[in-house]
Amino acid sequence: MQIDPNDWTISQPQPGSKGGKTCLVSSSSNKPIEINMGLGNPFGCPWGASSFDDDATQTRVNLDMTLDDDGADLFRQIDEWLIAYAIKHKDVLFKSKTDAQITDSYRRLAREKRRLPADVKKENQFRKSSLLGRNTSTDDSSR
């Protein structure tokens, strides 16, 4: 999967509703950045999109994915570009942070986590099948 962040632009910081600042990332032609992860090797979403505490009123959600090496490399490439951009424009974005502080405080798009234990994988498979209306439980008490 190829992507060229050098064609991207980042807007000036705008104040957010909770006091922080946000910058919008778009292509140089002012279009949203689209990354199609469905081509080639598919990735998995073991739990789907959800809020941290399963609060249905939340407007921001987490999406945990399992990525192959190509997908992980794509997100690493974007991370490195964003860090370099932030360091280059630190006077506008951060004013008083050093390069090391910017790098250390950056939260990477894809973070490596430990592998799921087999029992969690089995429970997740059961939940997914149950949502699809198929009970794959091997528990005899449910029959």
Image (spheres, rainbow, N blue to C red):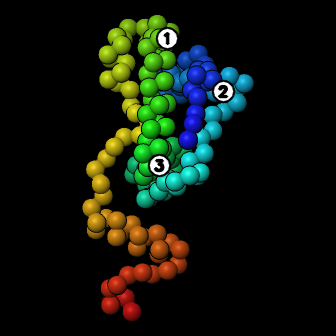
Question: Residue pushed farthest bottom?
Answer: 143
| Badge 2 vs badge 1, beta-carbon distance below 8 Å | no
Q: Residue 7: x percent and y percent?
A: 63, 23
- The answer to which quarter of the image holds residue 111 is top left
| Badge 2 vs badge 3, beta-carbon distance below 8 Å | no
Can you tell which of label 2 and label 3 is closer to the viewer? 2
- The answer to which quarter of the image holds residue 59 is top right
- The answer to which quarter of the image holds residue 76 is top left
Judge whether 102 appears above or below 46 on screen.
above
- Name the element at disc 2: strand
| Badge 1 vs badge 3, beta-carbon distance below 8 Å | no
The residue carrying pointer 2 sits among few (fewer than 14), some (14 to 19) or many (20 or more) residues within 10 Å by Cα, namely some
- Name the element at disc 3: strand
- Name the element at disc 1: loop
Q: Residue 20: x percent and y percent?
A: 47, 23
Look at 35% across and 24% down and name the residue there: 105
Q: Quadrant of the N terminus?
A: top right
Which badge, 2 or 3, is on the more N-terminal residue? Answer: 2
The label on residue 89 is 1
Q: Residue 53: x percent and y percent?
A: 39, 51
Return the residue at label 2: 27
Q: Residue 98: x percent and y percent?
A: 34, 11
Q: Quadrant of the C terminus?
A: bottom left
Q: Real-space Cα distance between discs 2 and 3?
A: 23 Å
**What type is the residue that disc 1 sits on?**
His
Q: How many marks?
A: 3
The residue carrying pointer 1 sits among few (fewer than 14), some (14 to 19) or many (20 or more) residues within 10 Å by Cα, namely few
Return the residue at label 3: 63
Judge whether 83 appears above or below 121 on screen.
above
Q: Real-space Cα distance between discs 2 and 1?
A: 18 Å
Look at 52% across and 50% down and name the residue there: 57
